[in-house]
């Protein structure tokens, strides 16, 4: 954690960011470091750190390839990396989701929602 304005610079903050916000940032860091361990929030889970992420991603990608060949639609049009990650974030409840992921709603959902739901059951939350 940065303890000086110079350390903020080494983190890649611009000179103007350090001038305007540096002292506030350092005060916040100092305040957070003074908190007892139990008062700190739980670390946020990262999607790529989830057990089974790579296996689930590859399985979804394979399903998308099968669906794209069956329906003669480009796999790139059918699903992007962002959309696959959106689905996995939703499935594992890593981020608040107000809407269904794009891969299981709309025209994409009509093509593969059921298959994706079945596949995701293999990767518990």
Image (tube, rainbow, N blue to C red):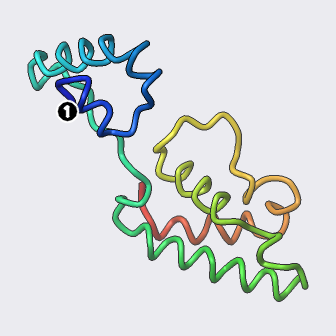
Residue 42 screen position, x and y as percent:
26, 33
Q: Residue at x 21, y 30 (%)?
A: 2
Q: Is residue 8 left or right of residue 122?
A: left
Report the front residue among 38 and 91: 38
Report the front residue among 4 and 105: 4
Q: Residue at x 53, y 51 (%)?
A: 89
Q: Quadrant of residue 98?
A: top right
Image quarter in which the N terminus is found? top left
Residue farthest front in this picture: 15
Figure check: 77 above or below 92: below
Q: Residue at x 9, y 19 (%)?
A: 36
Figure check: 72 above or below 101: below
Image quarter in which the C terminus is found? bottom left
Q: Is residue 72 left or right of residue 32?
A: right
Q: Quadrant of residue 74?
A: bottom right
Report the front residue among 84 and 12: 12
Q: How many marks?
A: 1
Residue 29 screen position, x and y as percent:
23, 20
Residue 119 screen position, x and y as percent:
57, 71
Q: Is residue 36 left or right of residue 46?
A: left
- Classed neighbour count for the residue bearing mark 1: other residues with Cα under 10 Å, few (<14), some (14–19), many (≥20): few
Residue that carries the numbered disc 1 in the rendered image: 1
Q: Tag 1, which secondary structure?
A: loop
Q: Is residue 34 left or right of residue 21?
A: left
Q: Residue at x 71, y 77 (%)?
A: 64
């Amino acid at each position: 954690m940065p303890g000086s304005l110079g350390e903020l610079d080494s983190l890649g903050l611009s000179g103007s960011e350090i001038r305007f916000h540096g002292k506030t940032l350092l005060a916040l860091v100092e305040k957070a470091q003074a908190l007892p361990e139990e008062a700190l929030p739980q670390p946020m889970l990262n999607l790529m750190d989830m057990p089974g992420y790579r296996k689930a991603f590859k399985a979804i990608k394979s399903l998308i390839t099968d669906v794209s060949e069956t329906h003669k639609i480009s796999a790139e049009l059918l699903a992007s990396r962002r959309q696959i990650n959106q689905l996995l974030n939703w499935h594992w409840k890593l981020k608040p989701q107000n809407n269904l992921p794009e891969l299981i709603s709309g025209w994409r959902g009509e093509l593969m929602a059921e298959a994706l739901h079945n596949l995701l059951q293999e990767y518990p939350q």
